[in-house]
Protein backbone atom coordinates (compact mmCIF):
# COMPACT_ATOMS: atom_id res chain seq x y z
CA UNK A 1 0.00 0.00 0.00
CA UNK A 2 1.36 3.44 -0.92
CA UNK A 3 1.95 6.29 1.53
CA UNK A 4 -0.63 9.08 1.17
CA UNK A 5 0.23 12.69 1.94
CA UNK A 6 -0.47 16.24 0.89
CA UNK A 7 3.19 17.32 0.69
CA UNK A 8 6.30 15.24 0.10
CA UNK A 9 9.53 16.98 1.08
CA UNK A 10 12.64 15.40 -0.44
CA UNK A 11 15.71 16.02 1.71
CA UNK A 12 16.21 15.85 5.46
CA UNK A 13 18.73 18.58 6.08
CA UNK A 14 18.03 21.78 7.97
CA UNK A 15 15.89 23.26 5.20
CA UNK A 16 13.88 20.09 4.54
CA UNK A 17 13.22 19.49 8.24
CA UNK A 18 12.40 23.18 8.66
CA UNK A 19 9.90 23.05 5.79
CA UNK A 20 8.24 19.98 7.31
CA UNK A 21 7.96 21.69 10.67
CA UNK A 22 6.51 24.86 9.19
CA UNK A 23 3.97 23.09 6.97
CA UNK A 24 2.88 20.70 9.71
CA UNK A 25 2.39 23.61 12.12
CA UNK A 26 0.09 25.18 9.52
CA UNK A 27 -2.00 22.01 9.40
CA UNK A 28 -0.78 20.29 6.24
CA UNK A 29 -0.03 16.58 6.06
CA UNK A 30 3.71 16.15 5.36
CA UNK A 31 6.13 13.33 4.64
CA UNK A 32 9.91 13.85 4.56
CA UNK A 33 12.09 11.42 2.60
CA UNK A 34 15.85 11.48 3.28
CA UNK A 35 18.25 9.12 1.53
CA UNK A 36 20.40 8.68 4.67
CA UNK A 37 20.03 9.81 8.25
CA UNK A 38 18.87 13.36 8.84
CA UNK A 39 21.57 16.04 8.47
CA UNK A 40 23.76 13.59 6.55
CA UNK A 41 24.35 16.05 3.71
CA UNK A 42 25.69 19.60 3.78
CA UNK A 43 23.91 20.62 7.01
CA UNK A 44 25.86 18.13 9.11
CA UNK A 45 29.16 18.55 7.28
CA UNK A 46 29.70 22.28 7.74
CA UNK A 47 31.85 24.32 10.12
CA UNK A 48 28.72 25.13 12.12
CA UNK A 49 29.07 28.91 12.19
CA UNK A 50 26.01 30.88 13.29
CA UNK A 51 26.52 33.96 11.14
CA UNK A 52 25.95 37.43 12.55
CA UNK A 53 26.02 38.83 9.02
CA UNK A 54 29.34 40.57 9.61
CA UNK A 55 31.11 38.23 7.17
CA UNK A 56 28.93 39.57 4.35
CA UNK A 57 28.94 43.25 5.22
CA UNK A 58 29.41 45.47 3.25
CA UNK A 59 29.43 43.25 0.12
CA UNK A 60 25.82 42.08 0.54
CA UNK A 61 23.65 44.21 2.78
CA UNK A 62 20.53 42.10 2.28
CA UNK A 63 22.37 38.86 3.05
CA UNK A 64 23.85 40.39 6.17
CA UNK A 65 20.44 41.64 7.32
CA UNK A 66 18.96 38.16 6.82
CA UNK A 67 21.75 36.59 8.87
CA UNK A 68 21.47 38.89 11.87
CA UNK A 69 17.66 38.55 11.90
CA UNK A 70 17.80 34.75 11.82
CA UNK A 71 20.71 34.73 14.28
CA UNK A 72 18.49 36.51 16.80
CA UNK A 73 15.55 34.20 16.15
CA UNK A 74 17.66 31.08 16.68
CA UNK A 75 18.99 32.48 19.94
CA UNK A 76 15.35 32.69 21.07
CA UNK A 77 14.00 29.35 19.84
CA UNK A 78 16.92 26.93 19.57
CA UNK A 79 18.42 26.66 23.08
CA UNK A 80 21.18 24.02 23.18
CA UNK A 81 21.07 23.63 19.39
CA UNK A 82 23.31 26.67 19.31
CA UNK A 83 26.06 28.18 21.44
CA UNK A 84 26.29 31.92 22.03
CA UNK A 85 30.04 32.50 21.80
CA UNK A 86 30.37 35.84 20.09
CA UNK A 87 32.88 36.31 17.34
CA UNK A 88 36.06 38.23 16.56
CA UNK A 89 37.22 39.64 13.24
CA UNK A 90 40.99 39.79 13.51
CA UNK A 91 43.15 42.16 11.47
CA UNK A 92 46.72 40.92 10.96
CA UNK A 93 49.60 43.03 9.58
CA UNK A 94 49.13 41.80 5.99
CA UNK A 95 45.39 42.62 6.04
CA UNK A 96 44.06 45.83 4.50
CA UNK A 97 43.01 48.21 7.30
CA UNK A 98 40.44 49.81 4.97
CA UNK A 99 38.65 46.45 4.78
CA UNK A 100 38.33 46.46 8.58
CA UNK A 101 36.99 50.03 8.55
CA UNK A 102 34.46 49.28 5.79
CA UNK A 103 33.21 46.19 7.60
CA UNK A 104 32.86 48.11 10.86
CA UNK A 105 30.88 50.91 9.20
CA UNK A 106 28.67 48.44 7.31
CA UNK A 107 27.85 46.47 10.47
CA UNK A 108 26.92 49.67 12.28
CA UNK A 109 24.71 50.73 9.36
CA UNK A 110 22.94 47.37 9.16
CA UNK A 111 22.38 47.16 12.90
CA UNK A 112 24.76 44.30 13.69
CA UNK A 113 26.10 44.79 17.21
CA UNK A 114 29.79 45.56 16.80
CA UNK A 115 32.60 46.80 19.03
CA UNK A 116 36.31 47.43 18.45
CA UNK A 117 38.10 45.91 21.41
CA UNK A 118 41.10 47.22 23.24
CA UNK A 119 44.09 44.91 22.85
CA UNK A 120 44.04 43.89 26.53
CA UNK A 121 40.33 43.04 26.38
CA UNK A 122 40.73 40.93 23.24
CA UNK A 123 43.65 38.99 24.72
CA UNK A 124 41.79 38.43 27.95
CA UNK A 125 39.01 36.73 25.94
CA UNK A 126 41.47 34.83 23.70
CA UNK A 127 44.81 34.43 25.50
CA UNK A 128 46.30 32.56 22.53
CA UNK A 129 45.52 35.28 19.99
CA UNK A 130 48.36 36.03 17.58
CA UNK A 131 50.78 38.55 19.13
CA UNK A 132 50.83 40.59 15.93
CA UNK A 133 47.04 41.00 15.75
CA UNK A 134 46.53 44.72 15.13
CA UNK A 135 42.80 45.22 15.64
CA UNK A 136 39.84 43.10 16.73
CA UNK A 137 36.17 43.70 16.05
CA UNK A 138 33.61 41.83 18.18
CA UNK A 139 30.31 40.71 16.59
CA UNK A 140 27.45 38.38 17.64
CA UNK A 141 28.59 35.25 15.79
CA UNK A 142 27.91 31.89 17.39
CA UNK A 143 27.98 28.14 16.85
CA UNK A 144 25.26 25.90 15.40
CA UNK A 145 25.10 22.23 16.36
CA UNK A 146 23.35 21.01 13.19
CA UNK A 147 22.65 17.45 14.33
CA UNK A 148 20.58 18.82 17.19
CA UNK A 149 18.99 21.60 15.15
CA UNK A 150 17.82 19.31 12.35
CA UNK A 151 16.64 16.60 14.75
CA UNK A 152 14.72 19.13 16.85
CA UNK A 153 12.98 20.46 13.75
CA UNK A 154 12.08 16.90 12.79
CA UNK A 155 10.76 16.21 16.29
CA UNK A 156 8.60 19.32 16.10
CA UNK A 157 7.32 18.31 12.68
CA UNK A 158 6.49 14.85 14.03
CA UNK A 159 4.70 16.37 17.02
CA UNK A 160 2.49 18.24 14.53
CA UNK A 161 1.69 15.13 12.52
CA UNK A 162 4.47 14.86 9.93
CA UNK A 163 6.15 11.57 9.06
CA UNK A 164 9.95 11.48 8.82
CA UNK A 165 11.39 8.68 6.67
CA UNK A 166 15.15 8.13 6.87
CA UNK A 167 17.24 5.84 4.67
CA UNK A 168 14.59 6.33 2.01
CA UNK A 169 16.26 7.48 -1.22
CA UNK A 170 13.96 8.80 -3.92
CA UNK A 171 14.38 6.70 -7.04
CA UNK A 172 11.66 8.27 -9.18
CA UNK A 173 9.35 11.29 -9.15
CA UNK A 174 6.06 10.81 -10.94
CA UNK A 175 4.72 13.57 -13.18
CA UNK A 176 1.34 12.81 -14.72
CA UNK A 177 -0.47 15.17 -17.11
CA UNK A 178 2.05 17.89 -16.27
CA UNK A 179 1.63 17.59 -12.52
CA UNK A 180 3.82 16.02 -9.82
CA UNK A 181 1.87 13.25 -8.12
CA UNK A 182 4.40 11.54 -5.88
CA UNK A 183 7.60 9.51 -5.80
CA UNK A 184 9.04 6.06 -5.37
CA UNK A 185 11.25 5.45 -2.34
CA UNK A 186 13.90 2.77 -2.01
CA UNK A 187 16.16 1.80 0.84
CA UNK A 188 14.57 0.81 4.12
CA UNK A 189 11.15 2.13 3.08
CA UNK A 190 10.66 0.70 -0.43
CA UNK A 191 7.23 2.29 -0.94
CA UNK A 192 5.45 4.64 -3.30
CA UNK A 193 4.33 8.02 -1.98
CA UNK A 194 1.26 9.69 -3.42
CA UNK A 195 1.43 13.45 -2.87
CA UNK A 196 -0.42 16.52 -4.03
CA UNK A 197 2.76 18.63 -3.90
CA UNK A 198 6.47 17.72 -4.03
CA UNK A 199 9.23 19.94 -2.62
CA UNK A 200 12.82 19.33 -3.69
CA UNK A 201 15.00 20.29 -0.72
CA UNK A 202 17.83 17.92 -1.62
CA UNK A 203 20.54 20.55 -1.33
CA UNK A 204 23.66 19.70 -3.29
CA UNK A 205 21.73 16.85 -4.92
CA UNK A 206 18.81 19.07 -6.00
CA UNK A 207 19.81 18.81 -9.66
CA UNK A 208 19.70 15.02 -9.61
CA UNK A 209 16.39 15.16 -7.77
CA UNK A 210 14.86 17.57 -10.29
CA UNK A 211 16.04 15.37 -13.17
CA UNK A 212 13.88 12.53 -11.79
CA UNK A 213 10.88 14.74 -12.60
CA UNK A 214 12.24 15.68 -16.04
CA UNK A 215 13.21 19.17 -14.89
CA UNK A 216 16.56 20.85 -15.50
CA UNK A 217 18.24 22.40 -12.46
CA UNK A 218 21.97 23.06 -12.58
CA UNK A 219 23.93 23.03 -9.34
CA UNK A 220 27.61 23.89 -8.97
CA UNK A 221 28.90 22.05 -5.89
CA UNK A 222 32.10 23.10 -4.15
CA UNK A 223 33.86 21.10 -1.48
CA UNK A 224 35.31 22.51 1.73
CA UNK A 225 37.41 20.82 4.39
CA UNK A 226 36.99 21.17 8.15
CA UNK A 227 39.75 20.22 10.59
CA UNK A 228 38.98 19.71 14.27
CA UNK A 229 41.93 20.09 16.63
CA UNK A 230 42.38 19.60 20.36
CA UNK A 231 41.93 23.13 21.73
CA UNK A 232 39.81 23.41 24.89
CA UNK A 233 38.54 26.74 26.12
CA UNK A 234 38.48 28.88 22.99
CA UNK A 235 35.79 31.48 23.60
CA UNK A 236 34.60 33.32 20.47
CA UNK A 237 34.56 32.37 16.82
CA UNK A 238 37.64 33.80 15.10
CA UNK A 239 37.34 35.26 11.59
CA UNK A 240 40.21 36.67 9.58
CA UNK A 241 39.35 40.26 8.65
CA UNK A 242 40.11 40.07 4.95
CA UNK A 243 38.12 39.16 1.83
CA UNK A 244 36.94 35.58 2.38
CA UNK A 245 39.60 33.02 1.52
CA UNK A 246 40.85 29.58 2.52
CA UNK A 247 41.47 29.06 6.22
CA UNK A 248 39.85 32.16 7.65
CA UNK A 249 37.42 30.76 10.27
CA UNK A 250 37.97 29.03 13.62
CA UNK A 251 34.82 27.76 15.35
CA UNK A 252 35.02 26.84 19.06
CA UNK A 253 33.56 23.71 20.61
CA UNK A 254 33.95 22.82 24.29
CA UNK A 255 37.29 21.02 23.96
CA UNK A 256 38.01 21.40 20.25
CA UNK A 257 38.38 24.10 17.62
CA UNK A 258 37.15 23.60 14.06
CA UNK A 259 39.34 25.14 11.35
CA UNK A 260 37.84 25.94 7.95
CA UNK A 261 37.59 25.97 5.00
CA UNK A 262 38.43 25.58 1.31
CA UNK A 263 36.19 26.21 -1.71
CA UNK A 264 36.95 23.95 -4.66
CA UNK A 265 34.55 22.99 -7.44
CA UNK A 266 33.77 19.29 -7.73
CA UNK A 267 31.99 17.38 -10.49
CA UNK A 268 30.16 14.93 -8.27
CA UNK A 269 29.09 15.70 -4.68
CA UNK A 270 29.45 12.01 -3.82
CA UNK A 271 32.84 11.42 -5.45
CA UNK A 272 35.72 13.80 -4.86
CA UNK A 273 39.29 13.74 -3.57
CA UNK A 274 39.93 14.46 0.09
CA UNK A 275 43.37 15.96 -0.25
CA UNK A 276 45.95 16.31 2.50
CA UNK A 277 47.14 19.71 1.28
CA UNK A 278 43.74 21.15 2.18
CA UNK A 279 44.15 19.98 5.77
CA UNK A 280 47.66 21.40 5.96
CA UNK A 281 46.49 24.73 4.54
CA UNK A 282 43.74 25.04 7.14
CA UNK A 283 46.23 24.55 9.95
CA UNK A 284 48.79 26.93 8.45
CA UNK A 285 46.31 29.71 7.69
CA UNK A 286 44.33 29.48 10.93
CA UNK A 287 47.54 29.40 12.96
CA UNK A 288 48.17 32.95 11.79
CA UNK A 289 45.25 34.00 14.02
CA UNK A 290 45.72 31.38 16.75
CA UNK A 291 49.34 30.13 16.69
CA UNK A 292 48.87 27.19 19.07
CA UNK A 293 46.64 25.32 16.62
CA UNK A 294 49.77 24.62 14.58
CA UNK A 295 50.94 22.18 17.25
CA UNK A 296 47.52 20.96 18.43
CA UNK A 297 46.54 17.37 17.76
CA UNK A 298 44.28 16.89 14.76
CA UNK A 299 41.33 14.86 16.06
CA UNK A 300 39.19 14.52 12.93
CA UNK A 301 38.66 15.95 9.48
CA UNK A 302 35.63 16.05 7.22
CA UNK A 303 34.56 17.56 3.95
CA UNK A 304 31.25 19.17 3.09
CA UNK A 305 29.84 20.13 -0.32
CA UNK A 306 27.98 23.42 -0.68
CA UNK A 307 24.63 23.44 -2.52
CA UNK A 308 25.41 26.34 -4.86
CA UNK A 309 22.99 27.27 -7.63
CA UNK A 310 24.93 27.40 -10.90
CA UNK A 311 23.24 30.44 -12.54
CA UNK A 312 23.89 32.51 -9.43
CA UNK A 313 27.51 31.37 -9.28
CA UNK A 314 28.00 32.23 -12.94
CA UNK A 315 26.70 35.73 -12.27
CA UNK A 316 29.19 36.11 -9.43
CA UNK A 317 32.11 34.63 -11.39
CA UNK A 318 33.32 32.89 -8.26
CA UNK A 319 34.64 29.70 -9.73
CA UNK A 320 38.34 30.41 -9.31
CA UNK A 321 39.46 27.49 -7.19
CA UNK A 322 38.87 29.31 -3.94
CA UNK A 323 40.73 32.51 -4.69
CA UNK A 324 39.46 36.02 -5.30
CA UNK A 325 37.37 38.62 -3.55
CA UNK A 326 34.04 37.27 -4.86
CA UNK A 327 34.51 33.85 -3.24
CA UNK A 328 32.70 34.53 0.00
CA UNK A 329 30.07 37.07 -1.03
CA UNK A 330 26.80 36.07 0.59
CA UNK A 331 24.76 33.75 -1.58
CA UNK A 332 21.00 34.03 -1.38
CA UNK A 333 18.51 31.21 -1.76
CA UNK A 334 16.30 30.49 -4.75
CA UNK A 335 12.77 29.09 -4.69
CA UNK A 336 12.06 27.65 -8.13
CA UNK A 337 8.54 26.75 -9.23
CA UNK A 338 8.71 24.20 -12.05
CA UNK A 339 5.17 24.69 -13.37
CA UNK A 340 6.45 26.35 -16.56
CA UNK A 341 8.71 23.36 -17.17
CA UNK A 342 5.81 20.95 -17.22
CA UNK A 343 5.84 19.90 -13.57
CA UNK A 344 3.04 21.69 -11.74
CA UNK A 345 3.03 21.42 -7.92
CA UNK A 346 6.77 20.72 -7.91
CA UNK A 347 9.22 23.28 -6.50
CA UNK A 348 12.90 23.34 -5.57
CA UNK A 349 14.63 25.35 -2.84
CA UNK A 350 18.37 25.79 -3.41
CA UNK A 351 21.29 27.85 -2.13
CA UNK A 352 21.28 29.74 1.14
CA UNK A 353 23.10 29.14 4.41
CA UNK A 354 22.56 27.05 7.54
CA UNK A 355 21.96 30.24 9.53
CA UNK A 356 19.02 31.18 7.29
CA UNK A 357 17.42 27.73 6.99
CA UNK A 358 14.26 28.80 8.89
CA UNK A 359 13.69 31.77 6.59
CA UNK A 360 14.15 29.51 3.55
CA UNK A 361 11.66 27.05 5.02
CA UNK A 362 9.16 29.84 5.68
CA UNK A 363 9.36 31.10 2.09
CA UNK A 364 8.87 27.58 0.77
CA UNK A 365 5.97 26.88 3.13
CA UNK A 366 4.32 30.16 2.10
CA UNK A 367 4.55 29.05 -1.54
CA UNK A 368 3.12 25.61 -0.86
CA UNK A 369 0.33 26.97 1.34
CA UNK A 370 -0.67 29.35 -1.44
CA UNK A 371 -1.04 26.36 -3.78
CA UNK A 372 -3.33 24.67 -1.23
CA UNK A 373 -5.28 27.81 -0.39
CA UNK A 374 -4.12 27.60 3.22
CA UNK A 375 -4.15 30.97 4.98
CA UNK A 376 -2.21 30.18 8.14
CA UNK A 377 0.73 32.32 9.31
CA UNK A 378 4.22 30.99 9.94
CA UNK A 379 4.86 30.46 13.66
CA UNK A 380 8.37 28.97 13.56
CA UNK A 381 10.05 32.21 14.66
CA UNK A 382 7.93 32.45 17.81
CA UNK A 383 7.61 28.86 19.07
CA UNK A 384 10.60 27.14 20.65
CA UNK A 385 11.88 23.93 19.18
CA UNK A 386 11.17 20.92 21.43
CA UNK A 387 13.72 19.80 23.99
CA UNK A 388 16.00 22.79 23.56
CA UNK A 389 16.53 23.29 27.30
CA UNK A 390 17.71 19.70 27.75
CA UNK A 391 20.87 18.58 25.92
CA UNK A 392 20.22 14.91 26.55
CA UNK A 393 16.70 15.16 25.15
CA UNK A 394 18.04 16.85 22.03
CA UNK A 395 20.62 14.12 21.62
CA UNK A 396 17.90 11.50 21.98
CA UNK A 397 16.24 13.17 18.97
CA UNK A 398 19.57 12.94 17.15
CA UNK A 399 19.68 9.19 17.81
CA UNK A 400 16.02 8.72 16.90
CA UNK A 401 16.46 10.32 13.47
CA UNK A 402 20.00 9.02 12.88
CA UNK A 403 21.15 12.63 12.66
CA UNK A 404 24.61 12.30 14.23
CA UNK A 405 26.99 14.13 11.91
CA UNK A 406 30.65 15.21 11.82
CA UNK A 407 30.18 18.90 12.56
CA UNK A 408 29.12 18.42 16.18
CA UNK A 409 29.71 14.75 17.01
CA UNK A 410 32.16 15.72 19.74
CA UNK A 411 29.55 17.65 21.74
CA UNK A 412 26.69 15.14 21.63
CA UNK A 413 25.92 13.51 24.98
CA UNK A 414 23.96 10.44 23.87
CA UNK A 415 25.20 7.44 21.91
Image: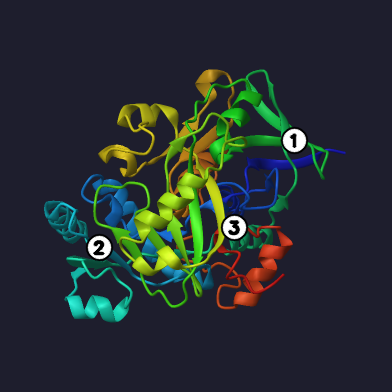
Q: Which residue occupies 47% across, 76% down?
A: 232
Tell me if residue 132 comes above or below residue 280 in the rendering.
Answer: below
Q: Position of residue 56 (x, y in %)?
A: 28, 50
| Label 2 SS | strand
Q: Position of residue 332 (x, y in %)?
A: 37, 41
Which quadrant of the figure contains the N terminus? top right
Q: Along the polypeptide, which appears first: circle 2 or circle 3?
A: 2
Q: Along the polypeptide, which appears first: circle 3 or circle 1?
A: 1
Question: To which residue does mark 3 refer?
Answer: 406
* Relative to 247, 224 lies left or right: right
* Relative to 106, 339 lies left or right: right
Number of the front mark, 3 or 1 = 3
- The dot on residue 9 is none
Question: To which residue does mark 2 refer?
Answer: 90
Q: Where is residue 391 in the image (x, y as percent from the top left)?
A: 60, 76
Q: Which residue occupies 44% across, 58% down?
A: 259
> Mark 3 Cα within 10 Å, few/some/many (few <14, many 20+)?
many
Which image quarter: residue 195? top right
Q: Along the polypeptide, which appears first: circle 2 or circle 1?
A: 2
76 or 37, nearer to the observer: 37
Amino acid sequence: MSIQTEVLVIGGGATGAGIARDLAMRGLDVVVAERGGLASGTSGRSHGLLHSGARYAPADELGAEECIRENRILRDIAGHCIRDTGGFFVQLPEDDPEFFDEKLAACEGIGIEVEVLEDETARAEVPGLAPDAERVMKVPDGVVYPSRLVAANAASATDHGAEILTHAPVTDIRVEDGRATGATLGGDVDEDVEAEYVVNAAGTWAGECAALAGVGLEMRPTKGVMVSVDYPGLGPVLNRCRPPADGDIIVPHETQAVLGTTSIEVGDPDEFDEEHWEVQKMVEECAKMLPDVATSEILRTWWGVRPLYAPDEADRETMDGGEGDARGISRGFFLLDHDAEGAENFASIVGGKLTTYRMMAEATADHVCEAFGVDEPCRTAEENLPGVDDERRLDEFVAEYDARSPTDEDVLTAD
